[in-house]
Image (cartoon, rainbow, N blue to C red):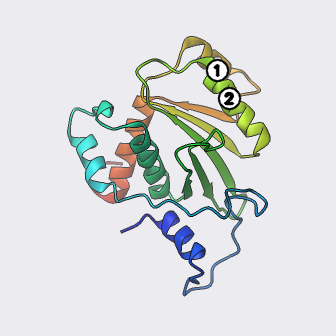
Amino acid sequence: MQPRGIRRGIRRGLGIRDPAPRSATLPILPDDDERAGAPILWIPPLTERLIRLLHTARDWSTIGPRQLEEVVAELLDGFGYEVELTQQTRDGGRDIIAIRHHEIKSDKYLIECKHREQKIGVSAVRELLGVGQVERASGLILASTSGFSKDARILSAREDVKWILALKDQDALQAWVESYARLRGWIGGP
């Protein structure tokens, strides 16, 4: 079964209308964006992979960079976001676009995933902040399985940055996996 947000994108791309009328939604990409007409990539079911991550040694090194992007996209989809996983190359500086519509305000997040052995430095934080200036979003998330350098953490903690950028390290990603598992009923607890 395809994730909810991806399935909607595929149905729209094929010109299939949803059977039930829904409230108007904002497009993920503006019509004048050259990527707007590109086919939406389908994320394969990740249930087994997530279960293994939960019940094994929580070894994030067993997945590759693209799989990390797919896992984060699936988690966000499970949390109720409409998700677009961008193409692998020339992705515009973000791997995932996640949108959640709410009565008060819709939110759009740009997420960049880094799966490396070394800690992510301040240059990656600056780069994502630059992407956020070009493509306006409610927030930016830099996810990394290797953590962040001291300078990257200092920059992200600045008053003018901390309200728009969140750094998510492996522990935070693992917490997302556990929240997702609870939502799916795989494990008990609050």
Local crowd size for mark 2, using a 10 Å CA cut-off: few (<14), some (14–19), many (≥20)? some
Q: Can you give x and y, in whole percent of width and height, for residue 115 in the image?
A: 44, 31
Residue hosting label 1: 123
Identify the residue under disc 2.
127
Left or right: 102 as drawn, with respect to 68: right
Q: Residue at x 30, y 55 (%)?
A: 47
Percent position of residue 167, x then y = 56, 30
Left or right: where 107 falls relative to 66: right
Identified by mark 1, the residue type is: Ser
Most distant residue in the top direction: 150
Image-quadrant location for residue 139: top right
Give the quarter of the image for residue 164.
top right
Image quarter of the N terminus: bottom left
For label 1, the SS is helix
Q: Are marks 2 and 1 in contact (CB under 8 Å)?
A: yes
- Identify the residue at image location x=73%, y=39%: 132
**Front residue of this view, candidates 28 and 87:** 87
Nearer to me, 155 or 38: 38
Decide if residue 138 is in sight here: yes
Asked whether the viewer can see residue 187, the reply is no
Residue 78 pos. (x, y %): 44, 57
